[in-house]
Amino acid sequence: MGEFEEDQFASDDADAAGEPLAGIPAREDSRAAEAPADRDAAAAGSEDPADPGAATEPGSPAMPGTAPEGLPAWSVRARRVLDEECIIEEATPGSLDAGRVLDLHRTMRFRASLRAHQLRQLSTFFREDPEVQGLLDDADITALKVAAGLRCTYPQAHAQVRDAHLAVQWMPVTFTYLRRGELPEQWHHYLIRHTRRLTEDQARDVDAHMAGIEIPSVSQDTFEKHVRLAVALATAGSLPAPPSQSRNVEIVGVDTDTGTASLMVTGPIPEIQALAHRLDVAARTVQRAQRHALEAGVEGPLPFDIDRDLAERGTALSLRTLRYAILTHSVLDIDPVQETSRPYKILVTVPALTLMGHSDAPAMLDGMTPLPAQLARELAAGESTWQRILTDPITGAYLPVTAETYTPTAQMRLQLRLRHPVCAVPGCVRATVLAAEDDHIIEYDHDHPGQGGQTSLWNLHRLCWLHHKQKTAGLIDPARDPADDPAHGDGTTTAGPLETVWDIGRDIRLRAREDTDLVTPRLARTLERDWRTYQRAHEDAVRLHAEEKTRPRQERAAEDRRAAWARHRGRRIIPPGPTHHETEPPF
């Protein structure tokens, strides 16, 4: 491992001064190697945990057989002290393998300390963020800033901020072991996963229970068992969430290779069983109707003939196919609520060469999910109207359209969905197909339309409902370069995707670009290569034709006659062979 200075983790971890980080040396609290090997895994120690506030330095070395100073005494002990001698006892001392094992152990300790440092940074960032003031319900703005530093999505940053607050503020004892390098990083992940849904008091109870475990030396299995026990004890007496709160419908198992996905419906058992029963009864009823129609030779469309091939097949659909057909092709009754005036439309973008069968480049569903070329051609064949989308051949950027009113046109909405399949805020991954807003970057002036921001693709983007609300409140502020606006200057448009500068809070500035069509540049290069090949072949043909014209006509005629005689002499007349009915000559 490389060398690291002792103060690499700076003032936030100043209380770790007793533990240098250069390669992470052996544990400071290691006890004598000759400690008895038959110590009970759950041997009783001090019944009264030491007061954490009584010690002055949580990172101080521990006395043999005791917990580190400033931390509660252990009530659950390991059979052996996990020092470096214990780790390499099966290896030859001084061997290459022994050195490598120790290096891995020290790297594990360093990674644990590094994770603690990052959690401390995130927790401090969250507590001192002026736009948040330490309120977990308002952690969204901090998450946007954190996402820029960690190069992750907004949901991932939001989860990391909450995990850091949980680990540092609510569970300080286990965090201290993590900072000392004595709680492996993966073990801490396990602890956090099991405590994320707990209240503050419950999390503190879990931390107090784990404080009595000899974390530096117990096995992973013992640690995980006590985490589960601590959570069970902390949540004892709590009423479980009612099944009604688990109601959910989500898309899972998206397989872009086969072009399939699954819809998972979760809810109370009686409701799910009732839904399955109703679906099964309806499928059996439709199957009987299909059989009767096929037997009677009914002409015209058959019920739920989703592939329009029942008459050709001559058999009814299977029950499992009919359950799917009924679920996906039935009208949803939401009476007395009025149905939306703008029904949901699936947006499938198919390259022109794929439609013509000259390429197998995939289509895109809502700008996010690739679809196989054959499935895309089948979907396009079933539609009576196609809409053309023009893209820049080099960058794949979508070419703009304009409008003169506050409300974007249908073509502009279509392009906005292509340019922003997810929320335009950097790091946010909420899909904009539903529950999103077409937002004016420069506000539209309803009283004086000519003075405010115009309804153009340069001045529009799509935001999820949360970030649209935050933009309206002034917590986030987008801006674009006026030089990219085709309404100004020479009227030309930028060849690449539009870039937006976002001010997050008062001090953070981020840049984001619109989505582009990834297939266009590839197809453009293919077409350009084919065009160059055609040009070379055409030039060769023109050159040969010019050379032939310069030759005397008699010379060309004589050469053609010689070629004709050569072809004639080269032909062989092969008599027909016997048929399968003939067994003897002649033939």
Image (cartoon, helix red, strand yellow):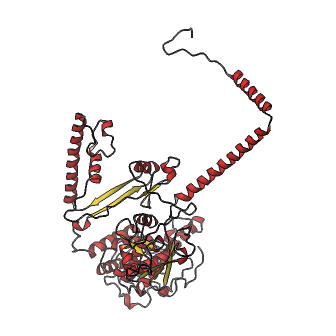
88 sits to left or right of 47: right
Q: Quadrant of the N terminus?
A: bottom right
Which of the two residues, 10 or 87, is positioned nearer the viewer here?
10
Where's the C terminus, which quadrant?
top right
On the image, the x and y values in percent for residue 513 come to 50, 71
All told, the count of numbered labels is: 0
Q: Residue 238: x and y, percent?
A: 22, 74
Q: Is residue 283 left or right of residue 89?
A: left
Of residues 239 and 434, the one nearer the viewer is 434
Q: Where residue 143 sits: x, y (%)?
A: 42, 78
* Residue appearing at x 37%, y 58% in the figure: 346
Q: Position of residue 38 (x, y in %)?
A: 39, 70
In the image, residue 472 above or below residue 79? below
Q: Is residue 130 visible?
A: yes
**Can the viewer see residue 174?**
no
Which residue is more in the foreground, 355 or 285?
355
Q: Quadrant of residue 408?
A: bottom left
Taking the spot 20% from the left edge, 52% from the top edge, the residue there is 278
The part of the image, by quadrant, that contains residue 255 is: bottom left
Figure check: 200 above or below 380 = below
Residue in the foreground of this view, choosing between 195 and 259:
259
Give residue 406's quadrant in the image: bottom left
